[in-house]
Amino acid sequence: MSRRKRRETAEWKWEQALIDDYDDYRWRQVLTPLCDKFKRWEAGELTHEDMDHAIHETHKHNQTLYH
């Protein structure tokens, strides 16, 4: 089966949707805490040093998603 026809199958579409959902789940696991910290920073609850640390930690976690 050619690559193009493979992408048109229901099985391929189901697999791709599953992969996309999992990717979204993993990105949300990493980025939601950072988003929450930005909200706390805007409210004056965190310092820019706290945010620097949070961004650095998030970046390290993002690197694992690329591997």
Image: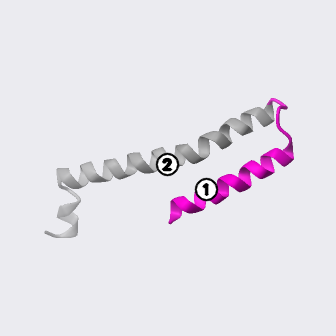
Q: Secondary structure at mark 1?
A: helix
Look at 69% across and 54% down and name the residue there.
57
Look at 72% across and 38% down and name the residue there.
37
Q: Residues within 10 Å of mark 1 (few under 14, many from 20)?
A: some
Q: Secondary structure at mark 2?
A: helix
Look at 85% across and 45% down and name the residue there.
48
Circle number at residue 26: 2
Three-letter amino acid code of the residue under disc 2: Arg
Percent position of residue 44, x then y: 85, 32
By secondary structure, the bulk of the magenta-drawn segment is best described as helix
Percent position of residue 30, x then y: 58, 47
Percent position of residue 18, x then y: 33, 48
Quadrant of the drawing holding the N terminus? bottom left
Indicate whether 57 appears above or below 38.
below
Circle number at residue 37: none
Q: CA distance from mark 1 to mark 2?
A: 10 Å
> Between disc 1 and disc 2, whose residue precedes?
2
Q: Give left or right: position of 32 versus 25.
A: right
Determine whether label 1 and label 2 are within 8 Å by CB: no
Read off the magenta span.
Answer: 43-67
Q: Residues within 10 Å of mark 2 (few under 14, many from 20)?
A: few
Q: Which residue is mark 1?
A: 61
Indicate whether 61 appears above or below 42.
below
Percent position of residue 43, x then y: 80, 29
Residue 29 magenta-highlighted: no
Three-letter amino acid code of the residue under disc 1: His
